[in-house]
Amino acid sequence: MRLETARLVLRDLDAADWEAVLAYQSSPLYLRYYSWASRTPEDVQEFTRRLGALNRDRPRRCYSFAITLPESDRAIGLVSLRRRVGDPHQAEVGYELAPEHWGQGLATEAACRLVGLGFSSLGLHRITATCVAENTGSARVLAKVGMSLEGRLRENEYFKGRWWDTLLYGVLRHEWGGERCGQGTAAVASLE
């Protein structure tokens, strides 16, 4: 599957994307809010292989895309929408972006496109997302996408020698509309 936005091309993630993903996942800026201390080629090969395999499941529950710029097919990030097991009307959106592309609205643009896909083409009722509370950039992305802060899970993740709070965001189909994302309610993707 291939989706487009004003500035991005989102295409199904492939195992061959591992080198591009490793390049940005190795950045200390990227690793700051993740439990990993570092990333190895083997870790990232398995990560991209697993996500690519989930994309091929039928019926499809996972939509994991490489975020690319129109002039290059190289992954500069990932964005995914995963239906909940046992509840096909709910899903979780997630994203990551190479640090050199932060602050340009690209994560917001990619996440908006997937939320639009979820509501307009997949018939979802509710989409959620989480982020570490200290990751204020990610929290801003979720607010710009139109999600509401639904709760704070206090000290629920332990990594890098400390406890971290997690913020839970969500949006319902009838709340979203897509206007913030320039999509309105008519955003439709072709499903292959």
Image (tube, rainbow, N blue to C red):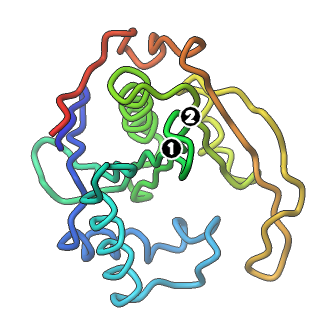
Classify residue 189 by image quadrant: top left
Q: Residues within 10 Å of mark 2 (few under 14, many from 20)?
A: many
Q: Is residue 136 above or below residue 97?
A: above
Percent x, y of residue 147: 62, 27
Near-viewer residue (188 or 165): 188
Q: Confirm or deny contact between disc 1 and disc 2 (CB under 8 A).
A: yes
Percent x, y of residue 124: 48, 28
In this picture, residue 138 sits left or right of residue 70: right
Q: Amino acid at mark 2?
A: Ile
Residue at 62% in and 35% down = 140
Classify residue 157 by image quadrant: bottom right
Q: Is residue 147 above or below residue 95?
A: above
Name the outermost residue toward the right: 154
Classify residue 159 by image quadrant: bottom right
Q: Amino acid at mark 1?
A: Val
Residue at 56% in and 34% down = 127
| Numbered circle sitting on residue 127 | 2
Look at the image and tell me in which quarter the C terminus lies: top left
> Circle 2 sits in a helix, a strand or a loop, which is it?
strand
Percent x, y of residue 47: 39, 75
| Numbered circle sitting on residue 93 | 1
